[in-house]
Image: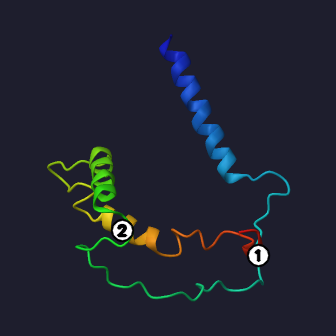
Amino acid sequence: MKRRKVLKGGLVLIASATVASVFRPVGAAMKVFTGGETWAAPPGRIPEIVDGSKLVYFTPREAALVKAVYDRLIPADELSVSASEAGCVTFTDNQLMGPFGSAQNRYKLNSCV
């Protein structure tokens, strides 16, 4: 590879990038979208404070298994805590007890159950 070819290629690259940023292709005018509705968060229940010492969904044996899996995936190191120390087991336990665990947001026909 010759030095002259590298310099020419670099100059061509810089020039083409400059030209592309200055001139837009035909029909590429800026579009401004107006109208529509403003987004608002759907009303929901306020999160409750969770007691991390109680299990509400898992059995103690299941909680120990989930703790082992989480700590294997996210172990503690010199910069951070492990997943179980961060409360991931408690979070999963409480999420499975609520609407997420019963798949409440999915479409289900109650007459077929």
Question: In this rendering, would 3 be left or right of 63?
Answer: right
Disc 1: CA contacts within 10 A as few (<14), some (14-19) or many (>=20): few
On screen, residue 61 above or below 99: above
- SS assignment at label 1: loop
| Residue sticking out furthest to the right | 27
Amino acid at circle 1: Phe
Question: In this rendering, would 50 be left or right of 32?
Answer: left
| Residue sticking out furthest to the left | 78
The quarter of the displayed image where residue 113 is located: bottom right
On screen, residue 81 above or below 37: above
Question: In this rendering, would 74 be left or right of 57?
Answer: left
Residue in the image at 32% along x and 47% along y: 69
Tell me how many marks there are: 2
Residue 20 image point, x, y percent: 69, 46
Residue in the image at 48% along x and 15% along y: 3
Residue 32 image point, x, y percent: 75, 74
Label 1 sits on residue: 33
Label 2 sits on residue: 91
Q: Which residue is nearer to you in this view: 20 or 58?
A: 58
Residue 27 image point, x, y percent: 85, 57
Residue 13 image point, x, y percent: 60, 33
Residue 79: assigned label: none
Q: Which residue is nearer to you in this view: 31 or 102?
A: 102
Report how far apart the C-alphas of labels 2 and 1 lie in the structure: 41 Å
Q: Which residue is nearer to you in this view: 13 or 70?
A: 70
Nearest to N terminus: mark 2 or mark 1: 1
| Residue sticking out furthest to the top | 1
Amino acid at circle 2: Phe
The quarter of the displayed image where residue 90 is located: bottom left
